[in-house]
Image: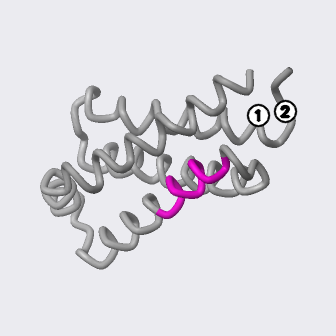
Amino acid sequence: MDTLVILAQLIIAASIVIVWVFRFDNIVLEFKQYGLPDLVRNMVGAAKIALATLLVAGIWYPQLVLVPALLMALLMVGAQLAHIKVRNPFIKYVPSFLLLLLSLFVAAAHAGLIGA
């Protein structure tokens, strides 16, 4: 189970870096579509990158993981709501929904709700 949790942490972190660093132009367009200001976009991006960093650091320092995983899940709920607001096609919901599930899985594992 520990290996699956670490893998989930790495998938979340890598996904965030890919989207918020290497595909930032898509993020700019999406936040314009949502009608959100640049400041909100930049704050969300900084928060996601910081949380992703803590999830990776949590591989060696597990006590760091629970709160960042829960906060990441909360941000993914926000992403879902943004997709709903603008009535995006279903396929646009999938990435943030999967990251929401992975974040909840990581949080549950670190909270001792699941695991072995």
**Residue 13 percent coordinates (x, y):** 46, 45
47 relative position to 40: left or right = right
Q: Which residue is rendered at x = 56% and y = 31% of the image?
A: 8
The residue type indicated by label 2 comes to Leu
Residue farthest along the front direction in this orientation: 60
Q: How many marks?
A: 2
Dot 1 crowding, Cα within 10 Å, few <14, some 14–19, many 20+: some
Q: Label 1's element? A: helix
**Residue 78 percent coordinates (x, y):** 45, 53
Q: Which label number is shown at residue 55? A: none
Residue farthest along the bottom direction in this orientation: 39
Is residue 15 found inside the magenta-colored segment of the image? no
Check whether the beta carbons of the residues at disc 1 and disc 2 lie within 8 A of each other: yes
According to the image, label 1 marks what residue?
A: 109
**Residue 32 percent coordinates (x, y):** 16, 63
48 relative position to 41: left or right = right
Question: Is the stretch drawn in magenta largely helix, strand or loop?
Answer: helix
The residue type indicated by label 1 comes to Ala
Q: Which residues are magenta?
A: 50-58
- Using the rendered view, name the quadrant where residue 64 is placed: bottom right
According to the image, label 2 marks what residue?
A: 113
Give the label, 1 or 2, closer to the camera: 1
Q: Which residue is rendered at x = 63% and y = 33% of the image?
A: 6
**Residue 17 percent coordinates (x, y):** 35, 50
- Using the rendered view, name the quadrant where residue 90 is placed: top left
37 relative position to 1: left or right = left
Query: Image quadrant for the C terminus?
Result: top right
Q: Which residue is rendered at x = 23% and y = 38% of the image?
A: 88
Is residue 52 found inside the magenta-colored segment of the image? yes
Q: Label 2's element? A: loop
Q: Looking at the picture, does residue 100 appear above or below residue 72?
A: above
